[in-house]
Amino acid sequence: MANTPDYSWPPMETRQVMGQNIKRLDGPQKSAGRAKYTSDFTRKDLLFAAYQTSPYAHARVTKVDTTPAERMPGVKAVQVVSPAGTEVQWEGTEIVAVAAVTEEIATEAVGKIKVEYEVLPHLVREDDLTKAGTHVKAAGEKTVGDPEQAFQQAEVTSDGHYGIPVVTHCCLETHGQVIEWRGDHVNCWPSTQDVTRYAGTLAPNLKVPVANIDVRMDYVGGGFGSKFAPDSWGEVCARLSQKAGGAPVKLFLDRATEQLIAGNRPSAYAKIKLGGKKDGTITAWQSESWATGGVTGGGSPPLPYIIANIPNQRQNHSAVSVNCGPQRAWRAPNNQQASYLTCCAIEDFAAKAALDPLEVFKTNLNLYAPEARRATYAWQLDKAAELAEWKQLWKLRGQGSKGAVKRGLGIGFNAWAGMGHNSQCRAIIHADGSVEIEIGTQDLGTGTRTIITQVAAETFGLPVGAVGLTIGSNQLPPDSASGGSTTVGGVSASTRKASVNALAKLYEAAAPALGVEPAQLEARGGKIQVKGGGKSLTWAEACRKIGGGGSISETGANDSRNPGGLIAAGASGIQIADVSVDTETGVVKVNRYVAVQDCGLIINPRLAESQVYGAIIMGISTALFEQRVMDEQTGRMLNADMEFYKLAGISDIGDIVVHMDIRPENDKRGVIGLGEPPAIAICAAIGNAVANAIGVRVPRIPMTPDHVLDTLDGRAV
Amino acid sequence: MARITELEVNGTRRHLDADSDRTLLSVLRDDLSLTGVKYGCGEGQCAACTVLVDGAPAKSCLTKVGTVAGKRIVTIEGLAPAETLHPVQEAFLEADAMQCGWCTPGMILGAVALLASSPNPTDAEIATGLNGHICRCGTYPRIVRAIRLAAKRAAKKGVHA
């Protein structure tokens, strides 16, 4: 057709399938235990692999003797990863792997391999910058306006120390894959967030053409930003398979190794000073911050977060290199840290000025960036305050409850882009009326399968049950990594375009029978009908016009640089925590947690809300419990497990109130990703609520009893 | 070393040959291909590996297979006849009580055991009963809702969920 098809979303009020709370399509498989994750791979010839890893944080490998393992019956392949001479930079570094006929034999055999080390000095803690010595690398000073003068003229100044530790992703399905390397062809079943690009990343290491690498994954047990690449274990697994004559090898990390090397979020620490007027206007910011993301340093929170246009600023940031496993992207990289540091400083300023922090957040709206989001934040601050009963419950810092248990409220804000990634989709309509959608994407549990199906069903005027879907393979039209809240925008736009394109072909086939031009047709309620009423064909009758057992197969693509109105970037949210702190035991309990969040057009409210619940619970877990504990003496992680690396359980989370901001002006912006934004502000809101409750700032996340009691008793935290 | 040659799993006698010191988790997954039971931590801290042994929830990662010979073992695959769902599974679907789904089989079996001993639990009892089950995706509020829903329906029908 000569004209560009109209891909735009149907108006909110006419949508039939989009906007509906369709049940998660893969729910029956998951709840019946039939969903096959990569680590569920079974086959008679499957070999199991296990690693021996370094117990030292910093050492040189001097000897690796694999003979004891090679002699064991049942061992099929041994792969040295870190040969003699290798400098190991963190505990858990993979030294050698063994593949054997059972997991037990592999574990026993790899344990018998003799590895010797020359132990080298290490640094594993960065919380005290004065002890970090040469591991500190200054990133340089950034100055805006005239901070000296602004602080001199300030009517109110506040100072604070804040810290947020390294936490681990702790995906319940650990990292790993099954790989079968037969001749010149490699079959991979990874646990990954990026099915499409897995082969391209693995290929150079194996020296196998990308075209010869087949990647498949149906289900993944969590990723949260830590499962983008094949990693070193992808290559090791492939080499073990090759050495074992092409048998498939399963190599998954055990929990301890997962905690040590398969992903963590950088820390952030800062001394922050704010200056401003008695009415709450902030005029000056000064921060000295530092962070670590492992050996390469890393971690640079964007400060000041959201309230970026403070007219006078001085910032210094340092990256600290530590001998610990490397950082990975963690659900809104650097944003949780930035939100925590900024929102805590703002509430400390409000407390110093004896002002209501809600008013201080509002007074300074003109400093928020980008400007286009200010009105949304203004609305959301009021909405969140209403839902949290701020007016009734908030008291000046430390002036609330009389007894040992103190109640407090605190605020946090978030911002995230969430623009849809590059994605291609194929929509196929068969002459028998069946429909197939194909995309090389993945569903991390976010509901991607359901969303894609809803978009296609909406476009075709069919129920979701009439649309078949295939994802999870690099043999399908390419998608991108599921990270940064980019999937929903990418796949919804590509699916919409492919479906509209296929439908246009169907209109051409059906139009003669209806005696109209194709452009006069629409698909609604299981029919292809003339717009504005009149003649129609059922979907099945229309598809028969394709003729001869044929099919229509059309593609559609989302180009993130040219999204064409279906999707957008820029989500915002305001969150308020309501906590009780027992000042005798130091235990912090979340009473209620309010989240007001926008994310543009919502395809499935029930799934969207699930993302917000999940993000908040993950945040509560990091705010109250999670921290990587490193031992200075031995250089080892003391809680590389799930016993002492505490995660929130069902009784730890309180009442969560989610309000999706679906006002029509948000819907009109199109689809925006939602995985990251609601995960950003929880440490900020809970940290502030605890300070509001007990009257002093607990400087370090997590808000554990020891941190709370040390603060109350005036001890260093 | 003692061997285990037979287990009663999901109402069926299964023949195998396993060292009695192996974990029930490993035997169910690797020898019997019952992969609905999941490895999470290997130390009884996340409950993803929960199965029912004589009706009681057991963490299969800590259970030696030698200790369950002759006992009735139920995994998620055996909770309902093929192609059907147990009322608790139905309730989890209805409440959308899952994301990635890794913890879901253990969570559902934990809920079945809870409802068997406490057919009409309060939210506090649900929280206590399932607190050892970790969901990293954070679906707890809907899990509570699902269990309440299953309990309510069972009460209406006058049966145990």
Image (cartoon, coloured by chain):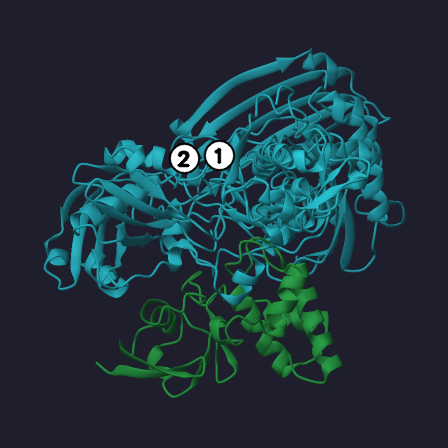
Q: Secondary structure at mark 2?
A: helix
Label placed on residue A197: 2
Q: Chain of mark 2?
A: A
Q: Does residue A601 appear in the picture of this structure?
A: no
Residue A380's place in the image compared with B18, above or below, is above
In the rendered image, the residue lying farthest to the bottom is B70
| Other-residue count near label 1 (Cα within 10 Å), few / some / many at <14 / 14–19 / ≥20 | many
Residue drawn at the location 49% of the way across and 26% of the way down: A318
Colour cyan, chain:
A
Q: Position of residue A96 (x, y in %)?
A: 22, 48
Quadrant housing the C terminus of chain A: top right
Judge from the rendering whether residue B100 lies leftward or rightward of residue A125; answer left or right.
Answer: right
Quadrant housing the N terminus of chain A: top right
State the residue in front, A306 or B36: B36
Label placed on residue A83: none
State the residue in front, B113 or A12: A12
Q: Chain of mark 1?
A: A
State the residue in front, B23 or A715: B23
Residue A307's place in the image compared with A588, above or below, is above
Say what amino acid the circle numbered 2 marks: Arg
Residue drawn at the location 23% of the way across and 33% of the way down: A207
User: Residues at badges 1 and 2 in contact (C-beta under 8 Å)?
Assistant: yes
Q: Which residue is mark 1?
A: A480
Disc 1 to disc 2, C-alpha distance:
7 Å
Query: Which colour is chain B painted?
Result: green
Q: Position of residue B52 (x, y in %)?
A: 49, 78
Q: Secondary structure at mark 1?
A: loop
